[in-house]
Amino acid sequence: MLKLVFDTAALITCCQFNVHGMPVVEHVLTACAVVIPGAVQSEVTIASDRYVDAQLAARLIAAGKVQVESVVLPRSNVLEYYKLGLGEKEAIALCLKKG
């Protein structure tokens, strides 16, 4: 099965919009495994008490449908030169780790 690594923006966007009455993330999960780093989980679920899309993401994570993997960023990291959030940095590092 194809594995997709999502950052926060990708996960939230796929949870916000519906196609044929079903969230886009549910369509994606029928064909792909979705993997996120721990920072993305934190960034998304912190607002789950206020936003429906964050609630959906939290449910998918809790059910194991969206997999969370830990990532260790190296101390000296080229990503530090860009204006990226921690979730984006970890998502890039996870992609590199996956090959």
Image: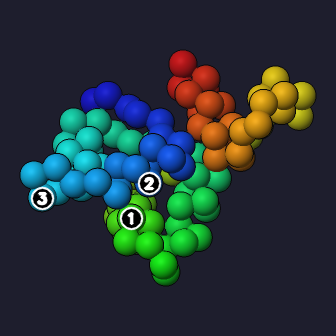
Specify the amino acid type for callout 1: Asp
Among numbered discs 1 and 2, the one appearing first in the sequence: 2
Could you tell whether 27 is left or right of 71 in the image?
A: left
Q: Quadrant of the N terminus?
A: top left
Dot 3 amino acid type = Gly
Q: Residue furthest right?
A: 76
Residue 61 to residue 55: above or below: above
| Residue that badge 3 annotates | 21
| Crowd rating for badge 3 (residues with CA inside 10 Å; few <14, some 14–19, many 20+) | few
Would you say residue 69 is visible in this rendering?
A: no
Residue sticking out furthest to the bottom: 49
| Badge 2 density bin: few <14, some 14–19, many ≥20, Cα 10 Å | many
Q: Residue at x 17, y 56 (%)?
A: 22
Q: Provide residue 43's location: percent of width, then percent of height.
A: 60, 59
Residue at horizontal 48%, vertical 74%?
48
Which class describes the residues within 10 Å of circle 1: few (<14), some (14-19), or many (20+)? many
Relative to residue 79, is residue 70 depicted above or below? Answer: below
Residue 62 x, y percent position in the rendering: 41, 66
| Lower sequence index among marks 1 and 3 | 3
Rendered location of residue 54, percent (x, y): 44, 66
Badge 2 or badge 3: first in the primary sequence: 2
Q: Residue most toward the left? A: 20
Mark 1 touches mark 2? (CB < 8 Å): yes
The residue that mark 1 highlights is: 53
Report the side of 38 relative to 10 (left or right).
Answer: right
Report the residue marked by disc 2. Answer: 12
Q: Residue at x 29, y 54 (%)?
A: 17
For residue 44, above or below residue 98: below
